[in-house]
Structures are given as C-alpha cells and as structure tokens.
Amino acid sequence: MIEGYAVPDFVSDFWHYYIAALTILGIVFSVWVLKSQTTRKLAPGEQAETLHPTWDGDLQELNNPLPRWWMWLFYALVVFGIIYLVLYPGLGKFQGVFNWSSASQYNDEKTRVDAQFDRVFQPFLEQDPMAIAADPAARAMGRNLYMTYCSQCHGSDARGARGFPDLTDNLWLFGGTPEEIRDSIVNGRMAEMPPMGDAVGGEAGAREVANYVLAMGGKPHDAALAAAGREKYAACAGCHGEDGKGIPAAGFPNIVDDAWQYGGSEADIVASIMKGRKGGMPAFQNMLGDAKIHLLTAYVWGLGGGVKPAPASVAEEAPVMESGAAAAAQQ
Ligand code: HEC
Ligand code: HEC
C-alpha cells in the first residue's frame, strides 16, 4: 500500500457531495439537451426548414433532425457513463462497486511481481552477505539491482562523484561492514552539517581552520594559517572530534583521512565550512524490502572495500574470505 494514495483527497464531505452533485446534474442536463433537440421527427413529406444565411446564392443549410442511429449513439454514451460511474470511482469519493483505484492496481501488480522475485531472492536471505558476494550468480543479480536503484547517484561503476560516495574503495563515511552498509541502504544517510562560517569568523577564519584540518591529516598546508586555525577548530571538535577522526557511526565523518565526499582541497574544505553540507541518501527499506536489500548489501560489500565485521559477530557465521577485494578478485 502506498501511503497517502488511497486516502480520499477531500477533507470534508462537502466537496464529495458537491462534485457528485455536479456530475449527476451534468448527466441530467445532457439528457435533457439531447431529448429537447431530438424529439421532433419530420412528418412524411414535410420539408426541413432552411437556416440563414445562404452561401453563394445556392448553398443552403437545412435544419434536419439528427439521424436516429446518431441520436441513439448519444443515449448509449450517457448509459455507458452511468454504468461507468457505478462500477468505477468518479462520483466524489464513491469508490465504485469494483472498488478499483490506480494505487490498488499498482499494489496488486507489485505484490504479484514481488512474489516472483521473492522466490528467486528469498533463499539468499539466509546466507551471509560475505558468502553471497562470492557467488557469481548472486553478484549478477545484485548488479542488476544496483544498476536500477543506485547507479543514478553512485555511478554505473559505483565510483561515485562529488557529493556521492565511491562505494568501491575501502574508505567509508559510515562504515563498510555488511551491517553498516545494510544500515546505509535501509535507513538512508542524511548527515547534516550546518554552515559554520559565523562560528569561525567568516571566510578568512574558514581558511585558517581548513589549513588546521589539512595539518591534522598530515597533508600539505600553510603552517601560519594552520596555527591560527587551531583554536577556532574548537567549533568543529564536538562533531568531528579533537583529532578530526569524527564519529562515523553517528554520521560525523573523519576529516583527516583521504575519504572526501566533497573534496579535500583547501577550497573544498572552506566551501564545506561556509555552506554546510547535507547528504542525500534516501532510505530504501519500504521501496526494496529485505531480500533485495540483502543482495545489494552483499553486492556493495563485494565491490572491493567491504570490511569484515569484528570477530565477535563473525564467530557463528560463515566467514569465507578475507575481504571484499578477495570476493571481487574471485570472479
Ligand atoms: C539520490 C541519490 C542516491 C541514491 C539513489 C543512492 N544513494 Fe547511496 N548515498 C548517496 C549520498 C549522497 C550518500 C552520502 C550520504 C551522506 O553523506 O550523508 C550515500 C551513501 C551511501 C552509502 C554509505 C557510503 C559510505 O561511505 O559509508 C552506501 C553504502 C550507499 N549509499 C549505498 C547505496 C545503494 C546500495 C543504493 C541503491 C539501493 C544507493 N546508495 C542509492 C546518494 C544516493
Ligand atoms: C553539528 C555537527 C558538525 C559541526 C559543528 C561541524 N561539522 Fe563538518 N560535518 C558534519 C557532518 C554531519 C558532515 C557530513 C555531511 C554529509 O555527509 O553530507 C560534515 C562534513 C564536513 C566536511 C566534508 C567532508 C568530506 O568528506 O568532504 C568537512 C571538510 C567538514 N565537515 C569540516 C568541518 C569543520 C572544519 C568544522 C568546524 C568549522 C565542522 N565541519 C563543523 C557535522 C559537523
């Protein structure tokens, strides 16, 4: 069921009656017009009256009644309209005897198709994503799903683009274990950083902090600016940590590694500070369901950057390989 679709658009019954009444009156009016215009037949031998004007001297327009077959066609249309309104929605919020709606038709079709897919996908639900990543047939299915639902943003090669993370490397914003990848897909990621320009004293202050961030990451930087930025970095430490390593599990990225979502040049970092940033990874739980998400998790994990979960959680599962890179290499 799609939320919001099957709910009538009318907030009070007034509009329901108003529209239903207009529709019925419209039909009654049509019948009346039809009848008033078509009851008269020419008496035998009677000449149809001539309408003005005459064109070109000898072209005349005669006021003949409608041919009967044509008139009956109009009546048939009215009857058709009434039958339609009884069977299908059209009278205000009256659903029609068939109780049909485009949303319910969509849902029926989706349920039917999902049932077919589930037969194929369901068996994988019991398997560990890391095992699935090693199965070429499952990877092919995962790839099809990826191309359909994910490639628009993460690219057909999954290498991402500015603002859209690369899913093939072993640098993760939110973690690369099967559980963490699954969580990214299920709940989406909408990590948000407010614009911080005011907190660091505008563009100039942002440059200082950016150089301090670069310095913490051991990257080329301007030492004088970085020194000036050290104190101002206090405004960032609450989210990105004193050491800049962030709290990935909470969606606060590490800003001292090489995994940049929006770019790691001084100018990029200044832009992140001045404008703020907001991720746009939609949640897929409702749209895809467990089985597809499970296959996708395995597929993304196997793209090359998959991280093995900490030993405790692996113990009773079936670890099959060293890493996602090994899975990718196997095919
Ligand atoms: C509308 C664009 C969009 C679509 C579609 C999309 N993503 Fe994302 N995805 C993003 C963005 C943007 C981020 C980063 C979110 C953030 O920074 O808060 C992201 C983050 C992720 C992450 C976390 C990456 C990391 O480094 O931790 C994973 C995993 C992921 N997406 C997988 C998928 C999969 C699988 C699909 C298909 C089912 C998909 N995405 C579809 C935009 C998208
Ligand atoms: C309220 C928490 C918060 C504060 C305060 C904050 N950030 Fe962020 N920052 C985030 C989040 C969340 C993201 C990820 C946004 C996304 O995924 O779209 C982010 C992203 C970034 C990025 C982009 C990382 C990339 O991979 O491209 C940079 C750079 C950054 N922050 C630097 C800073 C600096 C410097 C400060 C201090 C001036 C700061 N942030 C203050 C939460 C915060």
Image (cartoon, rainbow, N blue to C red):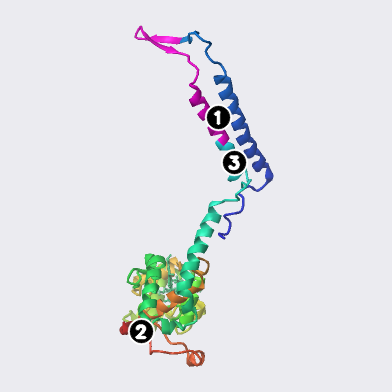
Q: Residue at x 37, y 72 (%)?
A: 143
Residue 209: give x, y in percent of width and height. 41, 76
Secondary structure at numbered mark 2: helix
Residue 113: give x, y in percent of width and height. 48, 64
Residue at the disc numbered 3: 85
Sequence-earlier tag: 2 or 1: 1
Alpha-carbon distance for marks 1 and 3? 15 Å
**Does 267 appear above or below 214?**
above
Alpha-carbon distance for marks 2 and 3? 59 Å
Q: Amino acid at mark 3?
A: Leu
Alpha-carbon distance for marks 2 and 1? 70 Å
Q: Residue at x 51, y 89 (%)?
A: 313
Q: Please identify the residue farthest to the right as the structure is shown.
A: 13
Sequence-earlier tag: 2 or 3: 3
Whether residue 199 appears in this view of the structure is no
Q: Quadrant of ligand 1?
A: bottom left
Residue at the disc numbered 2: 327
- Residue extent of the magenta highlight: 51-79
Q: Amino acid at mark 1?
A: Tyr
Residue at the disc numbered 1: 75
Whether residue 308 appears in this view of the structure is yes
